[in-house]
Amino acid sequence: MAQARDLRQAIDSMAGRDGPMLSAYVSVNAAIPENQERAYLVRLRDAMNDEGVPESLQDRVRESLEGETHPGARTLAVFADEGGLFEVYRLQVDLPESSRWGDPYVAPLTLVLDEYEAYGAVVLDAERFRYFVVSPLADAEGGEQVKGNGFRELDVDPSEPYPRGGMDQEPTSRRTEANVHKFYNQLGELTRDLTLREGVKRLILAGPKERTAEFRNLLPNEVKDRVVAEEHLDLSASEGEILDRLEEIRERAEHERAGELLAEIRESGVRGPGETIKALQEENRVYHLAVLWDLDGEVRWSDADGLAIMDVTREKSPYSGEPTRVRPLTDVLVELAAARGARLDFMRGENENTDTLRDEFGGIAGLTRF
């Protein structure tokens, strides 16, 4: 769980600093059309201008980010001040963009730390074994290398040598199969150790179909229960093709999970901005939110109370009488979810899940405890 420790240290380090400072969450995911030709640099420039960030600090931030042609992340969390602070955290999580000049804004990082479910991927055949993980923070450790789509390959070294003479396209003897069976038993224990160490909640098995099926049967139960996909994969494919295939599998598994979440909300949940925010902030009943990535709308926010006010005409808080300010609805949801310990899933793209969330649930919905 070194990745989680790094993220916790980042949160504690930033939250403990005095403002004013820039806290910016920049969407750099190349798969999002709005980020083509690095359009996020223009959006960040405009956001810093709107927030009143000093010009000299803006120049320093822009100069640093303009030099990165391949950020290697989905979201960049940028923290900077006039005293020399400049920290960038590379997140393998899609977060809505937001920028603040003032006190440190770490709610999105807290949300990622508490709620992100790391994916693991085992790629194997009769002779080869590789373990990849996608964790919230994209920085690599030691000799581990982060691939372009966020997969980080772990350096694994089984205590026994790989069995030889058992390539899946060749005839195999009973002795060879016995060696493979023994090898898989050992790898099952190794997979369990890596899965628990990295905090992997959802595991992909990929390789020749007969091999992944055999390996799955030999996995310890505590790991077997985390398998969400078992897919045929040709290990002779190029590195890029293997990683692209793993990302396709992961995205499909996430799509299926999102559909299951919406089905649960339909049975026992709340929907629409008003009902959902009331259940979240006043009743503390919501433990899992589903929100459209491109959700529009604004609400009033009371800094004194840490609460949203749905009536955008109310300039004073009905709770404390203190002044309120207008904030984007997505910013408020991130902050409330982090404060209430609720998981938040942003759904993007054009598919049946986003259609349901938009048309049936009004763009936002939540699964409730009672």
Image (tube, rainbow, N blue to C red):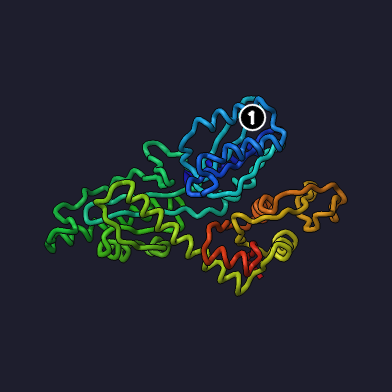
Q: From the viewer's perspective, is residue 4 above or below residue 319?
A: above
Residue 142 seen: yes
How crowded pointer 1 is (Cα within 10 Å; few <14, some 14-19, many 20+) is rated as: some
Near-viewer residue (159 or 275): 275
- Residue sitting at x 56%, y 44%: 27
Within the image, what quadrant is residue 271 found in? bottom right
- Residue sitting at x 34%, y 54%: 122
The number of discs equals 1
Classify residue 157 as left or right of residue 325.
left
Q: From the viewer's perspective, is residue 76 above or below residue 288?
A: above
Near-viewer residue (104 or 329): 329
Residue 340: x percent and y percent?
Answer: 67, 56
Amino acid beneath label 1? Gln
Q: Quadrant of the C terminus?
A: bottom right
- Residue sitting at x 66%, y 53%: 330
Residue pointed to by mark 1:
58
Residue 16 seen: no
- Residue sitting at x 36%, y 49%: 243
Near-viewer residue (161 or 57): 57
Extreme-bottom residue of the structure = 267
Residue 11: x percent and y percent?
Answer: 60, 41
Classify residue 177 as left or right of residue 88.
left
Residue 279: x percent and y percent?
Answer: 71, 64
Near-viewer residue (267 or 201): 267
Q: Secondary structure at mark 1?
A: helix
Residue 7: x percent and y percent?
Answer: 54, 42
Within the image, what quadrant is residue 153 found in? top left
Classify residue 261 as left or right of residue 191.
right
